[in-house]
Image (spheres, coloured by chain):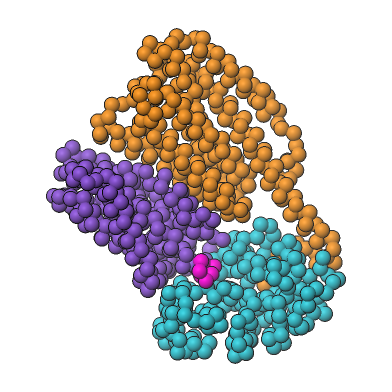
Chain colours: A orange, B purple, C cyan
Amino acid sequence: MTTQLESSPPPSWLVALTWLTPVAVIAAQVFFVMASAPDRDMGHLQKIMYVHVPAAWNAFLAFLFVFIQSVRYLWKRNEQADLMAAAAAEVGAVLTGLTLVLGSIWGRPTWGVWWTWDARLTSTAVLFLVYVGYLALRGLTDDPERRGRWSAAVGILGALNVPIVYMSVKWWRTLHQMQSTPSTVDPTYAWGLRANAIAFLLVLIVFIAWRYRGLRAEFALERSQDEAALTRGVAANVNDGLRGGVRA
Amino acid sequence: MSELSLAASLRGDWGRVKAVAWKDLTAERRSKSNFNAVVAMACLILLFFGFALGPDAEGLRNAAAGVLWLTILFSGVLAFNRSYQLELEAGALEQLLLYPGERWALYVGKLLANLAFVFLVELITLPLTAVLYQVAFPERWLTVLLVLVLGTVGFVALGTLYAAMASRSRSREVLLPLLLFPMLVPVLIAASGATASLLVGDPMGDSRAWIRLLVAFDAIFLVAATWAFQFVIDA
Amino acid sequence: MRGVSAQVHAGEVLAIMGHNGSGKSTLLRVAATALRPTRGHGTVWGADILRDTQRVRSAVALLSTEPGVYGDLTALENLHFAARMLGADASPTTLQRALDRVGLGREGGERARNMSSGMQRRLSIARLLLREPKVLLLDEPYNSLDPEGASLVNTLIRETVARGGGVLLVAHDLSRADGLPDRTLAMHDGLLGDEPRLTHRPLANELPVGSVA
């Protein structure tokens, strides 16, 4: 089961991706820096969008992954699914935080303010808080089985809410006749965005995979300690074969 | 599965829903201290918002809808953990989980009891807000009540679910709002938006869109929370 | 619990003794389906504890160390709630009869919170009387009970056995069990072992060595 995997070497696809990712990231940055001229209004500042937008996409993608793994866990009670959800939540939280910070930094020179209540940024802030709640719950729950069930419930409901939050914030702004955020995607920048989106997707996958392995190793260690204690007991017990059952 | 027909087992579960709701409400009625404390909290919050946002009458009137809903959320959240505390005090939860029947019956029973509780708090909070914030009696008061009900249902549905977890965790006082409030963003936006609009006669017809959102939200999360409860309530 | 294997037969009383923390309460809870075992399997009265939880629950009754009552409800109201949840007869006469049997006949209107722990314990025994369970699971049933209360528990055990049911009794001291247990096993550190030499003497600090690590 899980114990035999903890000491296995990382799969070759993961090693390959881990080497590929920094290359891709650097390549993507170089590409958009060189390939696109400074935006006529915002100058080089616009380049923050190349990181901010892909980070946002991947932050939401990470939460979709949390959702899928949460459903898997409740369905099959597969511990691996729970650990993958946890790994994805940690990476996703960081990406979401990054998105918010970058959005704020971009907004300051552009609109003169550190924050604007635009639909995307605000939904991302709410997503960040959902992540934080999810991780706090995990941190405060010691029993692994309960932790798995509870975080799965929170993850699933949180994910269901993401589109609803986005819609409500959007309506909230349009009904108040706020001007919509200037478009951040100019066709000339599309390729730069896509390149970076892929690079960040690689970052997401690699980080989640490594974090998952870390969590799995921790979990397997706990398990093997329990197994050792059990085996000690079994060896000493003469009468009953300890099969683990109660019949009444 | 069992020999009971579906109808019979549903009747049994519905009977359990009523029993749980009755039990929660009776326990609450006996020790009114919780209700009084929550109402007192609501009044305090209303005053505090007044201090922070006033004393200009115009400003207060504009803020009234938002303040009302914030008050409901901040005071109501105090009620949910209590619903589980009475199960945890003398180990009643263990027995509760060993009775026959489906888990959703426990959830719906607690949901109904919490709804009654929060509605009663709102019965006091609503007029008090109108008075303190000098709100004119709205023509479409019935719609305002509809919004109140819809928003409260979403609030209590999620609160009842999340409190099942938070009440059994460390840091329960902060964990419940931390988990619950991000989920309530649509409720807050929609309910306060609709209420604000209705208080000035709903000139743009905004309230319709918000009400639709609230109905959708309630439908989705009543189902989701009822389903999720079985995974959350067990030991 | 680390390794448990046991059988209780219909009409039998099995007692399990052990220190606090030996896992005997856990065993009882797993049998009652109040807890899911992380590994292993079990059947209670023919129903699998993992897959047929509803059937297990309708067959067993658990007397826990905690009374499991609602402090703000009266004794009668507590029983009324339990009866409704069990789908059992919730008429006032039936409930009063149950209270009478456990010696709480005049405390029906008393709030559970104001009752002593012995009285609360009796109230939870009254709850057991609302139905006729096939399997009685008793966790330290003699705690905080006076001799009358203890004999009440024993009567309950006898009645269950007479009906053809089984009883699993967990305690650290069996001196009040009146010789009822047909077999006694010892549990230590999550492991269950056979100890035919163990009688109803209260446990000393060390369990007899030989079968348990």
B92 in magenta: yes
Please indicate, yes or no, whether residue C165 appears anywhere in the rendered image. Answer: no
Is residue C179 shown left or right of residue A174? Answer: right
User: Which image quadrant for residue A17?
Assistant: top right
What secondary structure characterizes most of the magenta part? helix
C159 in magenta: no
Place of residue B157 in the rendered image (x, y in percent of width and height, measured from the top left): 39, 54
Image vertical order of residue C112 relative to residue A193, above or below: below
Place of residue C14 in the rendered image (x, y in percent of width and height, measured from the top left): 71, 78
- Count of numbered tags: 0
Please indicate, yes or no, whether residue C15 appears anywhere in the rendered image. Answer: yes
Is residue C163 shown left or right of residue B62? Answer: right
**Residue at 51% of width from left, 45% of height from top?**
A134
Residue nearer the viewer, A116 or C189? A116
**Residue at 32% of width from left, 53% of height from top?**
B45
- In the picture, the quarter occupied by the C terminus of chain A is bottom right
**Residue at 45% of width from left, 21% of height from top?**
A49
Place of residue C80 in the rendered image (x, y in percent of width and height, measured from the top left): 43, 78
Place of residue C129 in the rendered image (x, y in percent of width and height, measured from the top left): 53, 82
Residue nearer the viewer, A245 or B221? B221
**Residue at 42% of width from left, 13% of height from top?**
A43
Image vertical order of residue C132 relative to residue A74, above or below: below
Image vertical order of residue B15 relative to residue B74, above or below: below
Is residue A229 shown left or right of residue A186? Answer: right
The range drawn in magenta is: B88-96
